[in-house]
Image: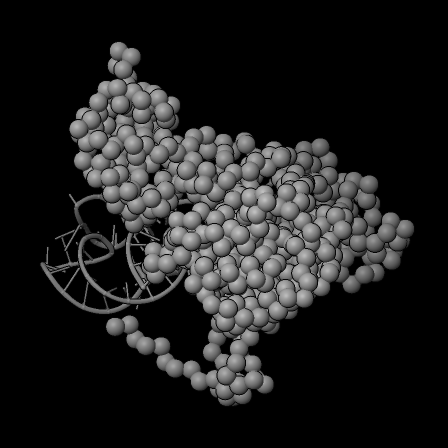
Amino acid sequence: MRLKSPEAGLKERIMHAFRSHTCGELRSSDVGSTVKLSGWVHRKREHANALFIDLRDHYGISQVVIYPTAEFYEAAKRCPSESVITVTGELLARDGEAVNKELDTGEVELRAETFLIESQAEALPLPVFGEQEYPEDIRLKHRYLDLRRDTLHKNIIMRGQVINSLRSRMIAQGFTEFQTPILTASSPEGARDFLVPSRQNPGKFYALPQAPQQFKQLLMVAGFDRYFQIAPCFRDEDARADRSPGEFYQLDMEMSFVTQEDVFNTIEPVMAGVFEEFGGGKAVTAPFPRIPYKESMEKYGSDKPDLRIPFELTDVSEFFLDESKTGFGIFAKITKGGGKVIAIPAPGATANKSRKFFDSLDKWAKKEMQAPGLGYARLKEEDGVVSSQDPALKNFDPELLKALLEKMGLKGGDGVFFSAGKTSAACKLAGAARNKVAADLDLIDEDAGFKFCWVVDYPMYEWDEDNEKIDFSHNPFSMPQAPEGKSAMDVLLEADTNEKKLDILAYQYDIVCNGIELSSGAIRNHKADVMYKAFAIAGYGPEVVEDKFAGMINAFKFGAPPHGGIAPGVDRMVMLLAGTDTIRDVILFPMNGQAQDLMMNAPAEVDPAALKELNIKTVPVAPKD
RNA sequence: GCGGGUGUAGCUCAGUUGGUUAGAGCGCUGGCCUGUCACGCCAGAGGCCGCGGGUUCGAGUCCCGUCACUCGCGCCA
C-alpha cells in the first residue's frame, strides 16, 4: 500500500509528522532515501554492535537498525515491546546473507537517525508476537492486543473483503441494499428477544430484530422486487462454538415473483463465487446438490450434513425385530415399541483401533449427548465369514447377519455403532456419532474443500412432544407445498388428521456447507387466508396472527406478490473461509459464553436515575434454592 | 436449566503411590556477544498451586462445596 501517489515528492513525504512510508512498503528501489516510519515494536534483537527492531504496522514489518553510537541507543534498547515509535533515517540495502527472504521488506533496513517513543507499552497480558494460544477471557478482555496478532488481524480484514464481495455480487444481480429498523417489535423467529424499554411509552418495550423478516417481506409488498442487507440480527440465546451470543450478521435477501429454484439460482453463484474468491483455492461444489429433509435425516441423522464424510447411516431396525434370530432383546423391544435402531459404520475401526475407542464413544454418548448409550460391534473375518463377538451381533442368525452387513457394505476390520431409541432421539445421536466417528477416525476429507448442499422439502409441522400438539417445525411464514392442480389452501383443508398434517411439506430450505448450517430460507406464504389457516392447524387463532404479526398480515390484504428469500450467516461464512472452528475468531469484539463483553464491561448496572426515567425497577436475583 | 473438561509464575505447560526447598520453555530485569531476524550465551527476579472447608503426622496431589473459563445438551436457523 502506498501512502501517496508516486508523484508525491520524497521531501513532501518526509515532512509528514509520522511516516513517509508504511512498514510493508519499502523495497531496494527506495535505497538511499531518507524515510520515516511509525509503528509498534514487534520484536527486538540486541547484538554486540547493533540493536535490531522489527517495526510493525497494519501493512507489514520493516527492520530498523540502531548502532550504539546513537544517543538514543539506551532508550531504544529499553523500549518495551508493543510501544509505538517513530523513526527516521537512511534506507540501506542489506547485503548477501543479511537479506531476509521471509519478509517483503527483507532487502532493506532503516538506519535510525531519530527515535521517538510515541506511546510506551506496559508489560503485556497477552504477547502479540507468535501464534501461541491464550485463554479466551484474557484475549477478550484485551481484544485490541489480540487483534494486533497476525491471524486474527487477517481474519477481520478478510471479513471486510467478503462483505464487500457479497455486496458487489448482490448489486450486480439487481438487488438494492436497504436499512431496516433496529428498534422494532418482536419478530417471528422464535428466539428470545432483546428488549429495549421505551421512555416515552412507560411499561412498553421495543425488541431488537431477530432478523428483518417482516420488514423484508413488507419491502416486497411495497414493490421493491429485490432486497438485500448485511443485516445485524439479535437473539438472546446461549452460545455455541459456531454461534456467538447476542448478535450476528446475515446476508439477508428477498425476491418477488420467484419460485424456490429462482432463489437457488440467484444465491448459489453468490455463495460459490465468494467461496472461490476467498477459499484459498479449495474446491467448491457446484451445482449444490438438493437433499430432501427426510433423506438427510435418514442418511446423515441431521439436517446439516457434512458431505465430506465418506459414509452414511442405515436404518437397521427391521433386522432386530425378531429376538429369536438376534439373541438381542434390548433392540427387539425398542423396535417393537416403534423405535428405531440406526447403524453408524466405522470403516477400518476394528483393524485400526482398540476396544478403548469403541468404549469411549459409548461413554461420549452417555455423557455428552446424555443418551442411554451407543452399542457397537467389531467385525472380524475368518475363512471368508464376517462375524462379531460383541453382544449386539454375537448371537445373530448367520444369514441375517450377512444381509445386514451387505446392506451396510461392511467387511472384516470395520466397526459398527448402533443408536437405538425413539426415532428422533436415535436419529439425532446417530447423526452426532457419524460426525464424531469420522473425526476420530480421521475420515473427514479435508481436501474436499467446501461441500455445499441444499436441504429441501422441510415438513410444515412437527409433533411437539412437550405439549402434545402439532406445531410449526420452522418459520411459520413458509408456503405449504401443493401438488399441481391444487392450491396450498386445498392442502391445508384436506389435512384432517394429525398424520396428514405432519405430512405437509413446505417450500422451506437450508443451505449447508461442511456440516455448518449457513442459512434457512423459504418461499413465503403471501396469502392472508392461507396464513390464518396454517396458524389454525397449529392451534393458533386469528388473534395470534393479528397480534404478533400485525404489520405483515395487514399488508397481505392489499396485494402481496409471491416472494421468497434466504439469509446466509456472514459470520459462519467467514469462519469457514478462515478455516477456524470458533466464530469468535472472525468477530471483532465478541462476547464470551455468558454474553458478557469483558473489555467494555457490558452488560452493566445503570444509574438509578436512568431507570427511573424509564419506569423500570429491578428486583434482586433470587438466591439459588 | 443440565452434563463433561480445565484451573500451578505475566503466558504455555510438567509435577510419580499424598512426603523435605513446586519445575521447564517463552516473556521480564541485568550482563556478555561484529549482523541478527523465533539470534545465541550467562545470571536474576517472579508462586495464596482459582477460592473455602475437610481427611491426614503431612495435601498442588484425596474428599466436599464454590467460583471462573470452555465444550456439549436444552434453547436457537
Give the percent coordinates (x, y) of residue A54.
Answer: 64, 49
* Nearer to us in this view, A318 or A432: A318
Give the percent coordinates (x, y) of residue A583.
Answer: 52, 52
* Nearer to us in this view, A281 or A67: A281
Tell me where residue A344 sits by quadrant: top left
* Above or below, A224 relative to A506: below
Q: Residue at x 87, y 58 (%)?
A: A12
* Above or below, A288 relative to A613: above
Residue A464 visible = yes
Give the percent coordinates (x, y) of residue A303.
Answer: 46, 44
* Above or below, A117 relative to A332: below
Q: Residue at x 74, y 48 (%)?
A: A173
Residue A282 visible = no
* Nearer to us in this view, A430 or A33: A430
Tell me where residue A216 sits by quadrant: bottom right
Q: Left or right: where does residue A326 sit relative to residue B38?
A: left
Q: Residue at x 73, y 35 (%)?
A: A95
Q: Residue at x 43, y 63 (%)?
A: A539
* Above or below, A17 relative to A52: below
**Tag count:** 0
Give the percent coordinates (x, y) of residue A394.
Answer: 20, 26
**Quadrant placement of the C terminus of chain A:** bottom left
* Nearer to us in this view, A593 or A119: A593
Q: How is the image coloured?
A: one colour
